[in-house]
């Protein structure tokens, strides 16, 4: 967990002058606030009290103001001055609030930008471990916690310190012994606040973690609401949410119990301090060693600084929350981003020639997901990859996109090692359509133009016709301006896949990867799309991943993966003639009795059975 003060300095970088101006305004307001009661001390002890009872400095002030008789007949003058001083203090307090709010809001806006930018550049492995709801909690509630501390509590800290420090010289001049009595309980109040902060910090951490769990549970449930309904699991999910909610309730209740104990105890200490000053002062006034005006000033001053000091306990408590929030934000901001080559290689206009050279990759300490895979894919050709779930097909795509990097071996595009290229450059050259494409909650046209915002409507329509989705789009009431809803929920699975395919074709990149991108499309529409793609053969290098072997039959070459290794490769005709795993799967899918009979003698691994 990063240290809080360096983290706050980093957050406030470039905005400290505005905070300094806020502190100066606070100092001016405090001086005026404490100077105003001196007016009534002068009136009480120098004007209304019997002559000769006031200190020399009060008599001097009264004389400079026109004398006792003049002020007695013009009491509105000190009253007016009192109002003016308080009004000026109010204006300075308002200025302090504006300056502090502007500086903190600017700082928090910059913090949000840093967080969002960091999330855009974190590796995929980070999101494999993180919960989406918890990340949302960090970017919203934790940031808000820091904002409140900057906007409210940092000025309050300055306010408490200034309100305590400013009157001390005046009080010492008026009466040193009375001053000692006035601050007698300040050390216990501060010590009590510190002890309270230490005890509450782990409780606040528990609340933050419980809030993160609750947000993650809610986000997961809303994302999978259709699955919940389909399996009639509403009651189970309600109980699950209830358990998480109860943890948050209990953690919050524990914090409020401590807060209640603190407020009641600190109230007693603060009232005891005022009572001590008032009681001792009355005795002094009765003895004739303290004037009534001086007692009024001490009581006023103690009332003005003791409660801000009491608030230090609340500020320290919120500081504990802020420390936890900064620690959680720091875990995101300090997480290593995707590596960038020190001197990225220059890439010419990509042709799309790909080479996988003895590539190996494993997730953590598990077995290899890709094990010594070597492939050569000429530019403009089509390679089909088939295999069971878990055989390494999608991992191969992630390696190609540099979402993950191989642990040994290399991948080259047009002779250039991907590891020497900037990841953004790699992804500019490769377009991918996934089995479960993601559509944003925008119009169909905005989703289609995602990778190429400047594309004309005619160009967009050309690609939607290839993807056989143009007719479906024009059938909507708003046509291409139809909003697709969150994650494209208002479209069918097949429509989402076809929109994603059109989006990829519109981008016109050197390499096109279709990762089971037509699995939700009916066979007739699939045949039409494949025929349209066949007409584009040679315009880009295509990697086709599919479970339907009819989808891959026209590929230039086909490779069969099993447990991360290439176990067969060749053309469709060669693989069928070889009578191996691919031939058996083809026979079963094509329902050809002769092929099925010939292939029956070949043992069919369970992996490829899943693929079929």
Image: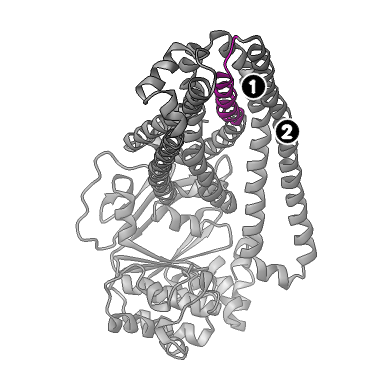
Question: In the image, 75: left or right of 264?
Answer: left
Q: Residues within 10 Å of mark 2 (few under 14, many from 20)?
A: some
65 vs 332: above or below: above
Give the image quarter of residue 299: top right
Check the picture and name the quadrant holding the C terminus: bottom right
Residue 515 percent location from the top left of the image: 47, 66
The earlier-in-sequence mark between 2 and 1 is: 1
29 vs 555: above or below: above
Q: In this picture, which residue range is highlighted in magenta?
A: 289-312
Residue 492 colored in magenta in the image: no
Residue identified by numbered label 2:
258
Kindly identify which numbered label has been placed on residue 189: 1
Identify the residue at horizontal 54%, vertical 9% (top origin).
176
Residue 298 colored in magenta in the image: yes
74 vs 45: above or below: below
Identify the residue at horizontal 58%, vertical 13% (top origin).
290
Res. 192 in view: yes
Q: Is residue 454 or residue 164 the one in the foreground? A: 164
Give the image quarter of residue 275: top right
Residue 49 percent location from the top left of the image: 54, 20
Q: Main secondary structure of the magenta part?
A: helix
Identify the residue at horizontal 58%, vertical 43% (top origin).
366
Res. 580 in view: no
Q: Is residue 96 or residue 59 the one in the foreground? A: 59
Count numbered badges in the picture.
Answer: 2
Residue 389 percent location from the top left of the image: 58, 61
Residue 156 percent location from the top left of the image: 51, 34
Q: Is residue 94 or residue 411 the one in the foreground? A: 94
């Amino acid at each position: 967990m990063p240290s809080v003060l360096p983290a706050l300095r980093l957050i406030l970088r470039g905005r400290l002058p505005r905070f300094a101006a806020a502190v100066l305004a606070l100092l001016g307001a405090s001086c005026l606030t404490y100077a105003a009661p001196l007016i009534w001390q002068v009136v009480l002890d120098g004007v209304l009290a019997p002559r000769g009872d006031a200190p020399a400095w009060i008599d001097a002030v009264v004389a400079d103001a026109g004398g006792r008789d003049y002020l007695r007949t013009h009491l509105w003058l000190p009253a007016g001055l009192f109002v003016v001083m308080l009004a000026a203090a109010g204006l300075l307090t308002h200025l302090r609030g504006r300056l502090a709010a502007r500086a903190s809001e600017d700082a928090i806006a910059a913090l949000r930008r840093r967080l969002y930018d960091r999330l855009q550049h974190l590796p995929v492995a980070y999101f494999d471990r993180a919960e989406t709801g918890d990340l949302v909690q960090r970017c919203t509630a934790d940031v808000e916690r820091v904002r409140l501390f900057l906007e409210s509590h940092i000025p309050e800290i300055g306010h408490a310190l200034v309100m305590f420090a400013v009157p001390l010289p005046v009080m010492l001049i008026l009466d040193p012994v009375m001053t000692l009595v006035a601050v007698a309980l300040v050390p216990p109040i501060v010590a009590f606040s510190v002890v309270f902060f230490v005890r509450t910090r782990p409780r606040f951490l528990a609340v933050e973690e419980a809030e993160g769990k609750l947000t993650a549970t809610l986000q997961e449930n809303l994302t999978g609401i259709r699955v919940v309904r389909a399996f009639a699991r509403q009651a189970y999910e309600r109980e699950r949410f209830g358990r998480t909610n109860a943890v948050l309730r209990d953690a919050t209740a524990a914090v409020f119990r401590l807060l209640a104990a603190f407020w009641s105890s600190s109230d007693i200490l603060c009232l005891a301090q005022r009572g001590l000053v008032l009681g001792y002062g009355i005795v002094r006034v009765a003895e004739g060693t303290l004037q009534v005006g001086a007692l009024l000033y001490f009581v006023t001053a103690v009332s003005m600084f003791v409660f801000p000091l009491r608030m230090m306990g609340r500020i320290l408590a919120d500081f504990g929350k802020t420390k936890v929030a900064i620690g959680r934000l720091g875990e995101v901001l300090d997480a290593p981003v995707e590596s960038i080559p020190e001197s990225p290689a220059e890439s010419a206009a990509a042709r799309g020639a790909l080479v996988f050279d003895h590539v190996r990759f494993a997730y953590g300490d598990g077995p290899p997901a890709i094990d010594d895979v070597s492939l050569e894919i000429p530019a403009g050709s089509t390679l089909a990859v088939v295999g069971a779930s878990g055989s390494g097909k999608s991992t191969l795509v992630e390696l190609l996109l540099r979402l993950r990097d191989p642990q040994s071996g290399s991948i080259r595009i047009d002779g250039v090692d991907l590891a020497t290229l900037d990841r953004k450059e790699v992804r500019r050259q490769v377009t991918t359509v996934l089995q479960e494409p993601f559509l944003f909650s925008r119009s169909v046209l905005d989703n289609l133009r995602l990778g190429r915002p400047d594309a004309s409507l005619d160009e967009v329509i050309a690609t939607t016709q290839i993807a056989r989705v143009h007719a479906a789009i024009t059938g909507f009431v708003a046509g291409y301006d139809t909003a697709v809803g969150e994650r494209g929920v208002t479209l069918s699975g097949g429509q989402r896949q076809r929109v994603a395919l059109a989006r990829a074709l519109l981008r016109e990149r050197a390499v096109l990867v279709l990762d089971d991108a037509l699995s939700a499309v009916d066979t007739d529409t699939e045949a039409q799309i494949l025929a349209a793609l066949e007409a584009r053969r040679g315009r880009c290098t295509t990697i086709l991943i599919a479970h339907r072997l009819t989808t891959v039959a026209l590929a230039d070459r086909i490779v069969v993966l099993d447990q991360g290794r290439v176990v067969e490769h060749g053309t469709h005709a060669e693989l069928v003639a070889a009578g191996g795993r691919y031939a058996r799967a083809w026979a079963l899918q094509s329902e050809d009795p002769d092929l099925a009979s010939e292939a029956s003698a070949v043992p069919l691994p369970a992996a490829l059975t899943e693929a079929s």
